Amino acid sequence: MQTRLKTLLLCACIWLMPAAPVHAATPAAGYAVPIGGALKYDNDAVWGRLVELAGGPGARFVVLATAAGNPERSARQIVDALTRRGAVAEALPVSARLVGVDVSRAVQDPALIAKVRAANGVFFSGGAQERIVDALAPGGVESPLLSEIRQLQQRGGVVAGTSAGAAIMSTVMFRDAQDVMAILKGQLREGKEVDRGLGFAGPALFVDQHFLKRGRVGRMLPLMLAKGYKLGIGVEENSAAIIHGDQIEVIGGKGALLVDLHDATHDPAVGAFNLLGARVSYLDRGDRYDMATRTVLPSAAKLADHKVDPNAADFKPFFANDPYYLDMLGDTTIVNAMGNLIDNPRREVMGLAYTMRPPQDDKQPSLGFEFRLYKKADSVGWFTGAFGGEDYTVANLYLDVRPVRVRQPLYTPWKQ
């Protein structure tokens, strides 16, 4: 019998309290647009679409570079990018790194609140996401400025953010969790690795960023399991996810990974992170996902090109190799494996995640994880060369993650 996923101890050594959202998120009429970071200023597909969603030329944006290390420069670059696409954009001075700014007063300033009230969109810069949450919801208490941003979204406006600005979109976020393997091994502490987010994407969807580039599927899965999320989206760099009601649309330079844990199971008796039957899909640019029906809707370019159905009688696979991935958390490895598997006669691919040189304070240096991707009857893909490369959309592959013991060192010199 399948066990229900719920907040639990990932292993005997972890203590994890559930993080309550700052705000009890309700469905918004507007848009949440997490951008995966490293957004290029010539990415018209993203910048132009933000202005379009906010009402087109003349749409008013306020920019909060609260997360940035250099807020003046970050705000200026974002304002310029929006202005070049026809928006009327203005930076709000809400950053502890701005000389002479008292953030606690700024988030209550009637003049700044009025600027948000007059805007059609808000854009949060990258940097350190904890600066945004600590400024707009100090001690978990929602500020008047944050309340006005929520009102903007409720009336149909756009709340967008890149990198750190994307991390805050969930009701729970990663606060400072750069070491993905440490998360897999159970280091998931409140106020350190994880914290409350601001919840613009709603209560049901977890959002992560820099996702494929930094192999962050390894940290998303433990957090989703611990916090009870059934759906998660990891947005790649220079790409964006437009979230509106139950619909997600992916735009930009690459895509996003969609993780569905509705039917996944976990065995707490194992004593380390494990997960069976997670459903994973890769959404390329132009693809959509319906959260209500849990259905991938490929782009027109994919539908006009080639459907890849590995369960069809006339399936003619492109790949014939039997890959094994020694670093499943490597740069875009998970998506490369998914594209290979969907167009391969093999029914599964395997890989590892482990620490090659464990730090001295690692209490479990030999703990690694086996990743097994496999097909079922509903696994399907689409391929196109229309974007200038070999681009796949992949729907409904399945993923098992099991703890394994990895030899340290993994290999030794060959001796005759």
Image (cartoon, rainbow, N blue to C red):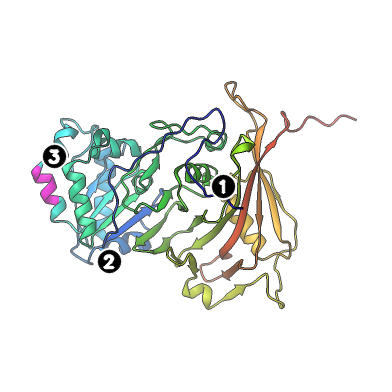
Nearest-to-viewer mark from 3 and 1: 3
- Residue at left offset 9%, top offset 44%: 110
Tag 1 secondary structure: loop
What's drawn in magenta, residue-wise?
110-115
Q: Quadrant of residue 97?
A: top left
Is residue 15 a member of the stretch shown in magenta?
no
Q: Give the label on residue 108, or none.
A: 3
- Judged left or right of residue 183, residue 133 is left
Q: Which residue is mark 1?
A: 331
Q: Residues within 10 Å of mark 3 (few under 14, many from 20)?
A: some
Q: Residue at x 30, y 51 (%)?
A: 25
* Circle 1: residue type: Asp
Quarter in which the C terminus is drawn: top right
Q: Could you tell me if residue 268 is visible in this image?
A: yes
Left or right of 282? Residue 158 is: left
Question: Marks 3 and 2, how far apart in space?
Answer: 30 Å
Q: Which label sits in the foreground, 3 or 2? A: 3
Q: Which residue is mark 2?
A: 52
Residue that lies at the very extreme toward the right in this rendered image: 416
Count neighbours of disc 1 (C-alpha within 10 A) and say few if under 14, some if 14 to 19, many if 20 or more: some
